Each structure stands twice: as structure tokens, then as C-alpha cells.
Amino acid sequence: MPDTHTQVPTRTLGKTGLQVSCLGLGTVKFGRNQGVKYSTGFELPDDMELRRLLDIAQSTGINLIDTAPAYGTSEERLGKLLHHRHDWVVCSKTGEEFVNGQSHFDFGAAHTRASVQRSLKRLRTDYLDVVLVHSDGNDEHIITQTDCFETLQRLKDDGLIRAFGFSGKTCSGGVLALSYADVVMVTFNPLETAELEVIQTARTLGKGVLIKKAFNSGHAIKLSPGNGQLSSAEAAAESLRFVLSEPGVSSVIVGTINTHHLQDNAASVAAFC
């Protein structure tokens, strides 16, 4: 049974007005097991397993769900399984498509609008809380040479999304995105701190910060240099502490389909966040 004593606290997501749990649930593994960079392979869980995972997440205070069109069937499955939509802060993305085992990218206005409308339909909702641009690595080109942000601003003005942002791959791109976006998603963990300036700049500007790859895509045991005695659970807890102790961080997104890992992570965050 879920541990009802564990309660993950919330933080404000920049100036969006959204209150998000310090720990968010990433859902790549809800719908895609091809072309992923996790340390071990996995089978996609059935609906009953996912429903239990979502129930546990909610019981521990987690309200932030992160998905994307590029996560296979993740959006459609969440659309069926997320009851009481208004209890959740749903973050999806645009820009990347994953079809027949391959990713391709489109940041044009037509695709951006169609992508958001498709996400709304798949998730069975009339609004998305956050939409992030899913970068292909050419961060500055996307921001300055495409109309992706302009389109997302129009969708925000239309009430279809509440906030938008950028999930980039470079420090310079992340900093530049903050001139336009409400939220950034950056890679940050004890071994990868190259995007620290993005977090610091976001804090100065009052923008929201979501963290990805806090466990280095499932390699958490490697995130404690010089101490080979830590278990995977201990290393994960230390990584979460490191990330959430950085001023300006709103929430860390951790993808899992393991209920024990989810409960352990929630307990770790609840203990110090």
C-alpha cells in the first residue's frame, strides 16, 4: 500500500502560478522502450501497473507529470489513466517525433500548433499546463530562426497552454531561451553541472526550472565519486539532495515504472526538500 506519511512538498514554478511537487514523474517508460539510453532494457507495463504507479505518486504528494509526443504511447496512456485531471500539472513537449524507431524534428509553426492540439486530444484535456520545446541540440537556431516560441505564445494567449519553455542541450541555448520562455528544463546532476548558469539565470529572472537526467539516465550509482560503498538507493538519494539543494530549482523529473523506486525517491525528497 502507498505510504501516506510521505508527502513531497511543492515549489512555485517561476512566475507561472503553478505549484509543482519537488519530484515529478517522467513517463518515457510508459510508452517507449526503443532508442532509449537507460542502463537496462525493460518491457512496457500494462495499464494496471501504471494505474498503481500513478496512485502511489499521487498519494505521496507528486502532482507533476512529464510526457512528450516522442515518448511513444505515453500521452495516450496517460489520457486514459489520469483521473481528476485538475489534480495534476501536466507537462508535454513539441518539436520531436519518434516514428519507426527514429527521431525527427520540426519546429515550424504549423507543426507546433498541430503537435499541441494532438497532445490535447491524446491526453483528453482542454489545456496543458506546460509545453516545452524538445530540442535536437541546435538550441540557438531553434530559438532565433524558427517561430516555435511565437506559436507557443499564441497558444498560451488562446488558453490552450498555461506556460511554455525549452528543454535544451546547451548552456548558451538555455540562457537564451530564458529571454522568451516561462520554464527551462536542464540536465543537472553531481557529474553534469555545465548548465548551472541556466539555473542561476532563471532564478535571477524568476523563471521556472525543471531538472532532467538527475540520475544520469539510470546510472545513479556512478554519481558519488570517491565512494564506491553507496548503494543505488543511497546514490539516488544523494543525487536528489544535490539537485534540489541548488537555489532556483523548481522540480526534478525522474522517470520510473518501479513502484519501490518511486516510493524511495519520494521519501528521500520529503525528508529534505
Image (cartoon, grey):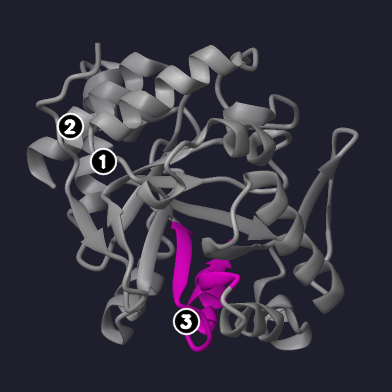
Residues at discs 1 and 3 in contact (Cβ within 8 Å) = no
How crowded is the residue under tag 2: few (<14 C-alpha within 10 Å), some, or many (20+)? many
Amino acid residing under circle 2: Ser
In the image, residue 35 above or below residue 197: above
* Quarter of the view holding residue 210: bottom left
Q: Where residue 84 appears, x then y in whole percent?
A: 42, 42
Residues at discs 3 and 2 in contact (Cβ within 8 Å) = no
Report, in whole angstroms, how far the alpha carbon at label 1 lies from the one at label 3: 24 Å
Q: Reply yes or no: does residue 118 show up in magenta.
A: no
Q: Which residue shows up at 15% across the image and 24% down it?
A: 4
* Between discs 2 and 1, the one toward the N terminus: 1
Magenta highlight range: 160-186
Q: Reply yes or no: does residue 184 show up in magenta.
A: yes
Residue 160 seen anywhere in this rendered image of the structure:
yes
Residue underneath mark 1: 240
Residue 136 seen anywhere in this rendered image of the structure:
no
Nearer mark to the viewer, of 2 and 1: 2
Residue underneath mark 2: 268
Report, in whole angstroms, how far the alpha carbon at label 2 lies from the one at label 1: 8 Å
Point out the image quarter for the N terminus: top left
* Between discs 3 and 2, the one toward the N terminus: 3
Q: Give the SS element for disc 3.
A: loop
How crowded is the residue under tag 1: few (<14 C-alpha within 10 Å), some, or many (20+)? many
Report, in whole angstroms, how far the alpha carbon at label 3 lies from the one at label 2: 30 Å
Residues at discs 2 and 1 in contact (Cβ within 8 Å) = yes
Residue underneath mark 3: 178
How crowded is the residue under tag 3: few (<14 C-alpha within 10 Å), some, or many (20+)? many
